[in-house]
Amino acid sequence: MLVAVTGGTGYVGRFVVEHLLRREHEVRVLVRDPARAGWLRDRGGVAIVEGSLGQSTALRDLVSGADAVVHLVGIIVEVGRQTYERVHVQGTAALLAAASAAGVRKVVHMSALGARSDPAATPYHRTKAASEDLVRNSGLPHVIMRPSLIAGPGNEVLKTLVGMLRMSPLVPVIGNGLYQLQPIAAEDMAAAFATAVEEPAITGTFDVAGPEPLTYHQLLDQLESALGVQRQRVPVPVSIVRFSAYAGMVLPNLNPITPDQLQMLLEGNTTNDNAIERVFHIPPRPFADVARDVVAPWAAMPPLSERPTAGRGA
């Protein structure tokens, strides 16, 4: 099967492309800057199309002859012309038009847990909801994925937390730290995308998350355990973080979190309708296992996935 992928050079994209290749699919990836996609050029079975979602010729080249499209492009911070509206909504509309014209048989689209049109929602979530509507109304068979935090080596949020836990005896916690996340292993997420591509019977919109909700404190507990450290936590009032977040809109280096990101963190990111095992038949890895892989470069113990089993080599 030939699968066209947008966002293939991103964090999630790399896992998805690797899974598709392992399952012996051909992959064609849209790349804005081929100079930054060396690993893709070195992989057999991958073709690169230079261009962006705003270039109709590139989109036609991307989807021509493709059996399925996996749409992963998204941003979490607006920078210059890369706005939520332009990327999430206009970009998705352009891709769907090209896919429809090319006769693509299925679109698998990455949205986000919490996507909704509620005026009180963040612009990120509102534009993700708008992109979902575009996919649903496209007339194309589709799967819409709504993942929670996608956890694995290379995740920027987890890298930041691990850096703090390694280097600082004091770790700040926004508010009470009881807001919840439900991290899904990046490998599990990629497997779900590949399954959605392959299984014609799977269609619709699905929440996809890890096996259990974790408070922010529990997330830190498991990262500390994987690192073999224990740090003192310092609560920071939400009002102070919110002020710093708004100040950071003027001075970007002042605070690493934006007002929208703060709102989404405090809202939590969990689901009671997790499809990872029910629909995609993937037993989700616990975050404790994923944490060992994330901290592997700094931990005394190797990650679980690299430890020898009993009797190996005997």
Image (cartoon, rainbow, N blue to C red):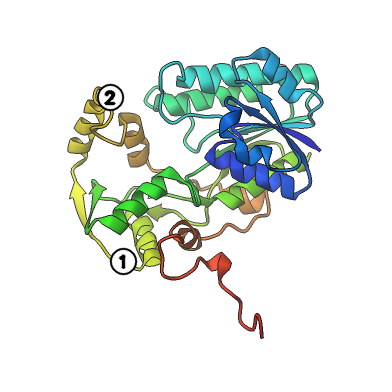
Q: Amino acid at mark 2?
A: Met
Q: Give x and y (percent) for residue 147.
A: 53, 42
Q: Which mark is residue 203?
A: none
Residue 32 vs residue 255, the one in the foreground: 32
- Above or below — where is 45 with respect to 294? above
First in sequence: mark 2 vs mark 1: 1
Q: Give x and y (percent) for residue 208.
A: 57, 45
> Quarter of the image containing the N terminus?
top right
Residue shown at 74% from the left, 20% from the top: 61
> Quarter of the image containing the C terminus?
bottom right
Q: Give x and y (percent) for residue 242.
A: 23, 33
Residue picked out by circle 1: 229
Residue shown at 70% from the left, 14% from the top: 57
Q: Give x and y (percent) for residue 278.
A: 65, 52
Residue picked out by circle 2: 249
Q: Is residue 252 visible?
A: yes
